[in-house]
Image (cartoon, rainbow, N blue to C red):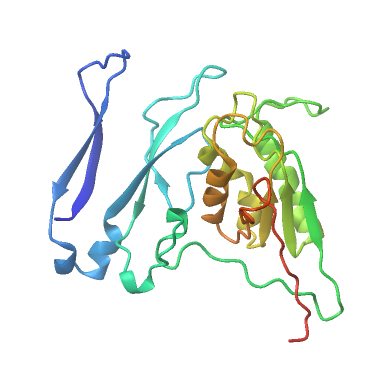
């Protein structure tokens, strides 16, 4: 029996941690076979939890207000997020990576090609140091500066619009580490958003801070592969490290 999300409600009972637990309320309706395509597309079929005030994971919607509000410098807001729609098996990418699965998955990057005049422009972006929160400003003359992640995204967007690269390569320390990027998925949801919004192919490798807060690099690869226009690969297993891979840029002449 299919189930439609109805509401999330706090229990009046306190948990052992002193916080009220959350309960998921749902109602049983028709089976998937009995539903129209419109009804299937309206079903909530996936739930997730994200942290911070930025974008939820690709394809998910956020339920507001947050289940736990943000307290500056103490904790990030906590949101229940959801994705709608029953996936048709015939259109499903049956991948070992669950973040690629879905109705043809996220938009994929086209093959990389030189232009007819033999040019291919790559923008390298290093050391973004994004956090689960909006981040703290360092080494800047901009004042006031209370949300470094937002400022970084704005700067990157201006550079993308000025340079119009064919490929963006993030060369490590997308995550700040240092106890601030403890939920890698919430950070990875936002670090490349200005690139994916412009439908630019992109790739990423790792730095020393990316794995500092606990999420393994191979898990981060799986996350990034589930984002639009990603060309991220884990690389060969017989080479030490994660993220050693080659992207071929083909001639303009087929």
Q: Is residue 230 left or right of residue 59?
A: right
Quadrant where the C terminus sits is bottom right
| Foreground of the two, 117 or 147 | 117
* Displayed quadrant of residue 216: top right
Picture residue at 46% right of the left edge, 54% below the top: 99
Q: Is residue 183 above or below residue 119?
A: above
Number of numbered discs on residues: 0
Q: Is residue 160 left or right of residue 44?
A: right
* Displayed quadrant of residue 245: bottom right
Residue 165 screen position, x and y as percent? 77, 62
Residue 119 screen position, x and y as percent? 85, 72
| Foreground of the two, 35 or 110 | 110
Picture residue at 51% right of the left edge, 55% below the top: 226
Picture residue at 31% right of the left edge, 12% below the top: 18
Residue 145 screen position, x and y as percent? 71, 27
| Farthest-out residue, front | 238
Residue 22 screen position, x and y as percent? 27, 29
| Foreground of the two, 201 or 39 | 201
Q: Is residue 4 above or below residue 151?
A: below
Q: Is residue 38 left or right of residue 74?
A: left
Q: Is residue 213 above or below residue 160?
A: above
Picture residue at 63% right of the left edge, 49% below the top: 192
Quadrant where the N terminus sits is bottom left
């Amino acid at each position: 029996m299919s189930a439609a999300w109805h509401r999330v409600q706090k229990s009046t009972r306190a948990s052992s941690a002193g916080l009220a637990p959350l309960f998921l309320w749902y109602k049983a309706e028709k089976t998937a076979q009995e539903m129209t395509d419109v009804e299937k597309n309206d079903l909530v079929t996936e739930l997730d939890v994200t942290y911070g005030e930025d974008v939820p994971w690709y394809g998910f919607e956020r339920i507001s207000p947050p289940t736990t509000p943000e307290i500056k410098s103490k904790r990030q807001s906590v949101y229940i997020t959801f994705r709608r729609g029953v996936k048709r098996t015939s259109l499903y990418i049956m991948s070992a990576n669950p973040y690629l699965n879905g109705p043809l998955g996220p938009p994929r990057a086209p093959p990389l090609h030189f232009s007819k005049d033999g040019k291919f422009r790559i923008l390298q972006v290093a050391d973004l140091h994004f956090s689960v929160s909006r981040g703290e400003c360092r080494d800047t003359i901009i004042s006031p500066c209370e949300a470094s992640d937002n400022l970084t995204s704005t700067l990157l967007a201006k550079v993308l619009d000025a340079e119009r690269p064919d490929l963006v390569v993030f060369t490590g320390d997308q995550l700040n580490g240092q106890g601030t990027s403890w939920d890698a998925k919430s950070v990875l949801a936002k670090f490349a958003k200005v690139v994916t919004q412009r439908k630019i192919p992109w790739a990423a490798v790792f730095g020393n801070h990316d794995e500092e807060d606990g999420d393994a690099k191979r898990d981060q690869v799986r996350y990034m592969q589930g984002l639009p226009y990603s060309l991220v690969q884990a690389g060969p297993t017989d080479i030490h490290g994660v993220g050693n891979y080659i992207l071929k840029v083909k001639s303009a002449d087929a």
